[in-house]
Image (spheres, helix red, strand yellow):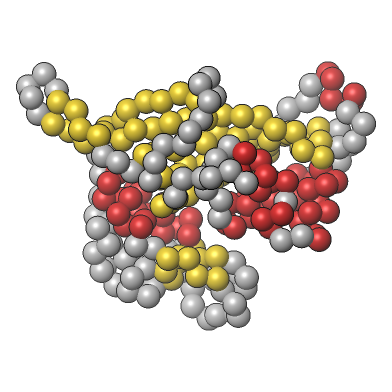
């Protein structure tokens, strides 16, 4: 396995791409084509001076994009017979030096299973998926030249958001609970990963991260404890 940078936050979105190519029928077995865009945001703050000598915070952003083709049958067998970190999805992310969490793999596998169940994809040899992942890392990944491009962006309140994200801890729901996520008012699935604040309130990971990204004030939505 490659040595991935330490990850502070991860957001992952996966969706199906309804696209067919003339050469698709040449594949001997069903294939899952995955296009992965990974955005690494370096946690070291970069400062830049404008023409007036005023300093502003900058974030170093490295974007990597790759396409991978996986045997769909192997992926489905891996999901049934192996742990999540033994699937070929895990291998794809690891090869791109993407810090991997179970919720990330679950998002991608869930999208793949949803595509398999779609009637419109039933007779296709190649199913296509787009995945976008954003991670905050301690250090920039060591990518080969040409594999990625790098930009500097205005930080705005990014560092406050990052600080709030660092204070979240992952919790696995080991048994059914009566509590609902205070943000979306939906319950927690047994076996799923959720996020807990330092004040011990729990939320769906995607819900609390989306809220903290959107709000200028970083606080627990349940008790208004300041997180950053």
Residue at 31%, 57% in the rendered image: 164
Give coordinates of residue 68: x percent, y percent: 70, 33
Q: Quadrant of the C terminus?
A: bottom left
- Is 201 placed left or right of 178 in the picture? left
Q: Which of these two is toward me, 137 or 215?
A: 137
Please provide percent x and percent y for residue 111: 68, 47
Q: Residue at x 73, y 46 (%)?
A: 88
Q: Judge from the rendering whether residue 92 lies leftward or rightward of residue 72; answer left or right.
A: left
Question: Compared to 16, does 227 lie above or below?
Answer: below
Q: Position of residue 4 (x, y in %)?
A: 51, 45
User: What residue is shown at x 26% (from left), y 50% (from top)?
Assistant: 160
Front position in the image: 96 or 13? 96
Image quarter of residue 190: bottom right
Q: Quadrant of residue 207?
A: bottom left
Residue 132 visible, this angle: no
Location of residue 212 (image quadrant): bottom left
Q: Position of residue 1 (x, y in %)?
A: 62, 46
Vertical order, 220 against 57 (above or below)? below
Residue at 39%, 73% in the rendered image: 201
Identify which residue, 95 or 58, lies in the foreground. Answer: 95
Q: Image check: 178 left or right of 183?
A: right
């Amino acid at each position: 396995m490659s040595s991935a940078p330490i990850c502070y936050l991860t957001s992952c979105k996966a969706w199906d791409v309804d696209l067919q190519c003339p050469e698709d029928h040449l594949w001997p077995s069903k294939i899952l084509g995955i296009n992965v865009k990974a955005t690494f945001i370096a946690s070291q703050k970069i400062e830049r001076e404008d023409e007036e000598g005023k300093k502003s915070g900058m974030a170093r952003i490295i974007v990597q994009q790759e396409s991978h083709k996986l045997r769909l049958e192997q992926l489905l067998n891996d999901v049934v017979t192996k742990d999540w970190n033994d699937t070929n999805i895990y291998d794809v992310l690891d090869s791109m030096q993407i810090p991997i969490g179970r919720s990330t793999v679950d998002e991608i596998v869930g999208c793949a299973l949803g595509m398999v169940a779609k009637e419109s994809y039933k007779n296709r040899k190649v199913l296509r998926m787009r995945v976008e992942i954003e991670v905050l890392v301690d250090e920039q990944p060591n990518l080969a030249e040409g594999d990625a491009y790098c930009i500097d962006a205005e930080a705005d309140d990014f560092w406050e958001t990052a600080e709030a994200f660092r204070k979240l801890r992952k919790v696995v729901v080991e048994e059914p609970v009566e509590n609902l996520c205070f943000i979306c008012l939906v319950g927690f699935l047994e076996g799923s990963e959720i996020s807990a604040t330092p004040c011990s309130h729990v939320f769906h990971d995607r819900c609390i991260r989306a809220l903290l990204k959107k709000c200028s004030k970083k606080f627990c939505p349940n008790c208004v404890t300041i997180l950053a």
